[in-house]
Amino acid sequence: MERVGYTNEQVNLDAVFSALADPTRRGIIARLASGDAAVGDLAEPFEMSQPAISKHLKVLEKAGLIGRRIDKQRRLSSLKAEPMKEAVNWLEQYKEFWLTSFDQLDVLLEELKTEEVNLASQKKGE
Amino acid sequence: MERVGYTNEQVNLDAVFSALADPTRRGIIARLASGDAAVGDLAEPFEMSQPAISKHLKVLEKAGLIGRRIDKQRRLSSLKAEPMKEAVNWLEQYKEFWLTSFDQLDVLLEELKTEEVNLASQKKGE
DNA sequence: TTTTAATATAACCATATAGTTATGGAACGT
DNA sequence: ACGTTCCATAACTATATGGTTATATTAAAA
């Protein structure tokens, strides 16, 4: 079985984390969060050649982090953040290790306990 | 000002994402989640030489993802997940893009609105 | 039709990465 | 004292990565 349908098509954590490990690419992602953009637009903030940006876009595309379409002679990119969700899912396995001080840890453990008991409910705490 | 104290000392997203981009290193992290371990223990599950594992450990250490200490002639590693928190913080900027279908997006936007009003609550529809 | 704008692709280069084998040092067991 | 265990480090290799310039392609614009 190949993990049908759903949101993600394979989502390769290697490719995703690797794509996110570059500041230029994270910058591109940030830019795309405010709307689709053409290669030229994306290249403009960086002191880098256009082919370099095209390469970065290819990396992002292979990681599934952007989609691309053609509009006239321009290639528009749009953010596709599903792989980020997968990354976060992986990372959150280790949430319990995020806290250093013990009282914070207590708080988290309390939260986790609550989540278990109360998976599909609505809670209006304060 | 250099961002004093707190949980993180610099947390370099480049190094963190880069460290996480390798399956061996993610495997090491998974192993460390169940307890501190020596280099030999960490190497055992992988078909790879000991020096290779030592290199991976160095990468993880530079990313701040593990700490190391000496016990007799063994070098123990322990998970330090604070950088993961930073990674998640960065990723969650894009939470709104994680959903593809519009009704799901509606759900999220509703959640975000609720969160604003009510920071310490949980909500889960069904 | 000719030119220009937007982008991809190829060829190239330097550095980084991920592995290897070989070797050496520190601490333990005998 | 001697060998063994645990590990780091050095030296090397192959491939990947991130950039460049040069060139080709495609559609708009003149």
Image (cartoon, coloured by chain):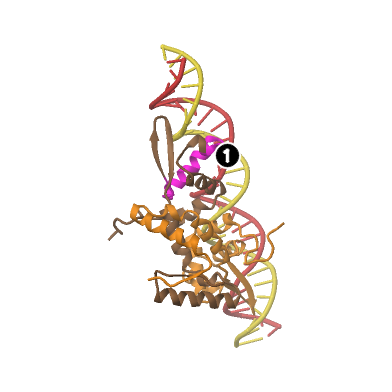
Chain colours: A orange, B brown, C red, D yellow
Please identify the quarter of the rendering in which residue B3 is found. Answer: bottom left
Which region of the structure is painted magenta?
B42-66
Q: Residue at x 70, y 58 (%)?
A: A2
Pick the front one: C9 or A87: A87
Quarter of the image with the C terminus of chain A is: bottom left
Q: Badge 1: how crowded within 10 Å, few (<14), some, or many (20+)?
A: few
Q: Is residue A78 above or below residue D6?
A: below
Q: Is residue D2 above or below residue D10?
A: above
Q: Is residue D10 above or below residue A80?
A: above
Look at the image and say whether residue B44 sits in the magenta stretch. yes
Q: Residue at x 54, y 38 (%)?
A: B43
Disc 1 residue type (three-letter): Pro
Residue A26 is situated, as x and y percent measured from the top left of the image, at 49, 64
What secondary structure do most residues of the magenta stretch adopt? helix
> Dot 1 corresponds to which residue?
B45
Pick the front one: B49 or A93: A93
Look at the image and say whether residue A121 sits in the magenta stretch. no
Residue at the outermost front position: A117
Q: Residue at x 55, y 46 (%)?
A: B24
Residue B110 is situated, as x and y percent measured from the top left of the image, at 49, 77
Q: Is residue B39 left or right of residue C12?
A: left
